Each structure stands twice: as C-alpha cells, then as structure tokens.
Amino acid sequence: GEDVEQSLFLSVREGDSSVINCTYTDSSSTYLYWYKQEPGAGLQLLTYIFSNMDMKQDQRLTVLLNKKDKHLSLRIADTQTGDSAIYFCAVINQAGTALIFGKGTTLSVSS
Amino acid sequence: DTGVSQDPRHKITKRGQNVTFRCDPISEHNRLYWYRQTLGQGPEFLTYFQNEAQLEKSRLLSDRFSAERPKGSFSTLEIQRTEQGDSAMYLCASRLGTPTDTQYFGPGTRLTVL
C-alpha cells in the first residue's frame, strides 16, 4: 500500500539551515505537501509542490522533489526557535480522496 | 475567524461512554475529512464527505464510529462505547473541491478515555 517515511528527529542551531527528508512509495499524487504541527495544535499547511515541478521556493522554505527516487525534501533557511515543531510530509492517496502522512519529523532548534 | 473550527477541544470520558465531536469547515468548502492522530504518528484518514454524502470510509472506522454531515455544512463524529484505544486527537479538514486546492485543518479534539 501507499507509504510515506520520514526521519523522526532533527536538531539544529538557530541561524543554520534545516533539511527534512521524506520518501514515498506511490508516485500518482498530483501534489505533495508539507504541514507543520506545534504542540497540542492542528496542522498548518506550510507549502506544497506540483508533481511536475522539481523545486519550489517560498521565502525561507525550499521544496525539492526527485520523482525518480520518490524523494521530497523541505529546506528551512535561517532556522529560528519558532520553527521548532513537528513537520509532516503528505501525499494524496491513489483514490485522490485523502492525504497519507508520514510519522513526522520533530525539529528542535537551539539558540 | 474563517478557519476550520472543532468543538470541544478536549474531552475526557470513561470507557463505555459515548462521545460526539463537531467540526465546522470553512464556509465555501464542500469537502470535509476526519482524521485520527495518535501519539508519535501522523494523521490517519477516517472518512470523507462531499457535501452531505459520505463517499469513503477507512477500515479504521469501526462500527462504533459514525459520522454525519446532514446539511453539507458542519459534521459530527460520534464514538459509541468508547475504549481506551480510542484516545487520540481527532482532526477535521476541509477543502474547496477544485483540483488545485488543499486541505485545511482544524485545531483538533483531544479525546482521553479513562
């Protein structure tokens, strides 16, 4: 079945760049998403990329998509303590009806 | 506030009791989704509505769970005879329904079953 995998933890210093990686098994998703979740809160859509693109930049965020390797990454430039959160990669299921999420990467930013 | 809202935000109940959660989607969104998130996991899809029609149900949605969206606006998720394994965050999301739009999530309802 469809599966999305992410590394579980990433620790960086304030001001450094963070790179969060994701791999997925089903390549039929038209869009691929990154969501952010702060403690006790719902999910906030950060950014998304159309499947025929290989890069998208949005202020401090850069999304890279390698369709051949089924690999998606999120780069956060100049990481701040306020970026500390759990980041979820998500793709659309084969039926096109729901999102499939990874387990999330906990980003810890130290000052 | 024009985002997705959920009520209550927290619910503590005893095993065997019934609980009901409410979701109010963004007003023009005709698609509504329920997900469940347990500790250390990503959200898992439960069910999906297009207007008032429930079009898909995950195998996670046992017969103790029922969801409705009677007038195609707000939705309710009821869990009957709750079990400790039902403890989770229940998330609602909505989207407009065009091919390029995305799902927007509410703050969730955290259920604790004692």
Image (cartoon, rainbow, N blue to C red):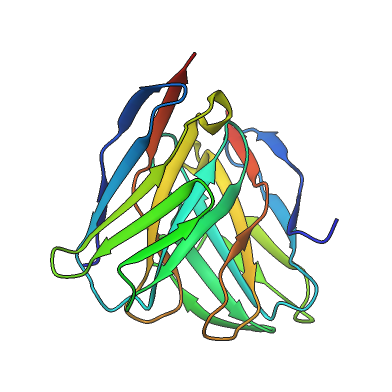
Above or below, comparing residue B72 to residue B108 in the picture: below
Q: Is residue A15 visible?
A: yes
Q: Nearer the viewer, residue A85 or B40?
A: A85
Which of the 4 image quadrants contains residue A81? Answer: top right
Image side of residue A66 versus residue A43, left or right:
left
Q: Is residue B62 visible?
A: no
Q: Nearer the viewer, residue B114 or A51?
A: A51
Q: What x and y, as percent, mark residue A106?
A: 40, 32
Above or below, comparing residue A106 to residue B82 in the picture: above
| Residue drawn at x 57%, y 49% as measured from the top left | A43
| Residue drawn at x 28%, y 79% as measured from the top left | A28
The number of numbered badges drawn on the structure is 0
Image side of residue A20 versus residue A70, left or right:
right
Among all residues in the image, which is located at the extreme left? A69
Q: What x and y, as percent, mark residue A9?
A: 32, 29
Among all residues in the image, which is located at the extreme right? B1
Above or below, comparing residue A23 to residue B108 in the picture: below
Which of the 4 image quadrants contains residue B98? Answer: bottom right
| Residue drawn at x 69%, y 83% as measured from the top left | B52
Q: What x and y, as percent, mark residue B79?
A: 60, 54
Q: Quadrant of the C terminus of chain B?
A: top right
Q: Quadrant of the N terminus of chain B?
A: bottom right
| Residue drawn at x 60%, y 66% as measured from the top left | B66
Which of the 4 image quadrants contains residue B2? Answer: bottom right
Q: Nearer the viewer, residue A62 or A3?
A: A62
Q: What x and y, as percent, mark residue B31?
A: 63, 78
